[in-house]
Image (cartoon, helix red, strand yellow):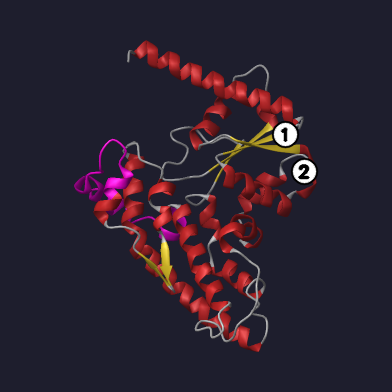
Amino acid sequence: MSRAQKIFEASSADEVLYLSLLKFKGACGQPSVLLVEGNDDVTFVDACLCRFNPSARNRVATYNCRGKSNVLKLHDLISESMEFSLSEFWCFIDKDFDGMRGRAPSEKIWMTPTYSFENLLVSEEVLGSLLSGEFRCNDVDGAQDVINIKAHFRRFVDSYIDALGFANLCAYYARLENIETHSHDQTITPNISVDYPTVKKPLTDENILSRMGKAKPLDKSQVLLKETDFKKLNPVTDWRGKFLLAAFVAFLEALKHDRGTKKPTIFSKKANMTFDPRTDSVRTFSSLAALPDCLKLYVESIPS
């Protein structure tokens, strides 16, 4: 493909992206539009509005841009447009492994201080709230159950680091080297499971290298060259959030199964519960998590 053709296709794609937003803005009829990366981000941002700026919910619409790159492109296109003003838009992106991708910070872009918003939802505090409410640990026996399970949670985190370290390293390498990969949420995430309380290694190193690489398997020797810098990252806050959240959900599913058995081994006794960790996770955890002040201030700046 010639350079001219590449430029034409890129400009055409930007025009389609821009026109789609223009149509959405006209159809939604709201004065403010929130630009987010994906479906789960829509849920997360709406939960944040409920917590920090509920009076704004009836005056905003949230637009799924289908990817971080599209949020950033739309921010730039809006800033140069005649039809829109950036004052009408609020952009939410994940930091990932590549931050702003070379762009200067903007007061209209909120970027997670963690890899993604999912990292914010996994904590001992969230677990404690779930145990007290959804898992019915609110009597004498339940108090001891909470103490025991919180100790198990620390083992869970350590095992997560061991089990998902190489997969995260591969994702880190691919992003920094701009190597196209298959969707991690189709190749890695479905294989994450827990043998309570520990996370099992989802795949062999060779399988991870093969499944991640799109054009060809990732080169393990090249991946390992990034290991020194990768180890400087905090696994809970700076590794891929969807991997961590998937592991946490599996941990909670094991707890739910035990809580519902006639003779539990983790809990003191059986209890009926309706909470489903797999379907209720993002909204429920977002209502319980200790979210950063920078997010609170940003959401509060949306006009009500």
Asked whether residue 222 is drawn in magenta, I would say yes
Q: Residue furthest top?
A: 4
The residue closer to the viewer here, 201 or 288, is: 201
Q: Residue furthest front?
A: 262
* Residue 192 screen position, x and y as percent: 41, 59
SS at mark 2 in the image: helix
Q: Is residue 85 visible?
A: no
Distance from disc 1 to disc 2, alpha carbons, whole Å, reads 9 Å
Numbered range of the magenta stretch: 209-238
Residue type at the position of mark 1: Ser
* Residue 148 screen position, x and y as percent: 51, 82
CA neighbours of label 1 inside 10 A, class few (<14), some (14 to 19), many (20+): many
Q: Which residue is mark 1?
A: 32
Q: Residue furthest bottom?
A: 140
Are dots 1 and 2 in contact, CB under 8 Å?
yes
Could you say which disc has been placed on residue 56 in the image? 2
Residue at 37% x, 63% y: name it: 161
Q: Is residue 67 above or below residue 79?
A: below
Q: Is residue 38 above or below residue 147?
A: above
